[in-house]
Image (tube, helix red, strand yellow):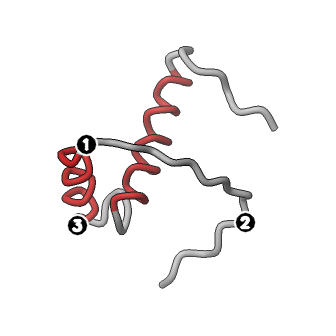
Amino acid sequence: MPRPKNTTETVQITLSTTAQVKELLEELSKTGFYGKNAADTAHMLLKEKIRDLQKEGQAPSPKF
C-alpha cells in the first residue's frame, strides 16, 4: 500500500557530508526501516534526533 501524499509544506536544504556518512545512510536505507534512499534516511534520522532534543528540553518545540 503506497504512502499517502505529504500535505505538509516542505522546503529544500542542502547538506554536505562525507562519503562514509553517505555510505552508512545508503546501508540503512537498504533495511527500509528509515527510508528508501540516503536522503529519506537522513531526513528521518534528523527528525528523530530533533524530537529527542525537544524531549530533553534542549530544542524548542515547533511553533504552529
Q: Which residue is mark 1?
A: 18
Number of dots carrying numbers = 3
Which class describes the residues within 10 Å of circle 2: few (<14), some (14-19), or many (20+)?
A: few
Q: Relative to 55, say whether 12 is above or below.
A: below
Task: Work out which residue is located at the far bottom of the displayed protein and give it.
Answer: 1
Residue 7, picture quadrant:
bottom right
Which of marks 1 and 2 precedes in the sequence?
A: 2
Q: Relative to 48, say whether 59 is above or below.
A: above
Residue 46: x %, y % from top left:
45, 41
Residue 40, picture quadrant:
bottom left
Q: Relative to 17, say whether 6 is above or below.
A: below
Residue 35: x %, y % from top left:
38, 62
Most foreground residue, 59 or 10: 10
Residue 7, which numbered label? 2
Residue 52: x %, y % from top left:
46, 28
The amino acid at mark 2 is Thr
The amino acid at mark 3 is Lys
Q: Residue at x 30, y 66 (%)?
A: 32
Could you give the CA–CA distance between mark 3 and mark 2, rounded to whole angstroms?
A: 26 Å
Could you give the CA–CA distance between mark 2 and mark 1, rounded to whole angstroms?
A: 32 Å
Which class describes the residues within 10 Å of circle 1: few (<14), some (14-19), or many (20+)?
A: few
Give left or right: position of 27 versus 29: left
Q: Residue at x 58, y 20 (%)?
A: 59
The amino acid at mark 1 is Thr
Residue 36, which numbered label? none
Residue 30, which numbered label? 3
Q: Nearer the viewer, mark 3 or mark 1?
A: 1
Q: Residue at x 41, y 58 (%)?
A: 39
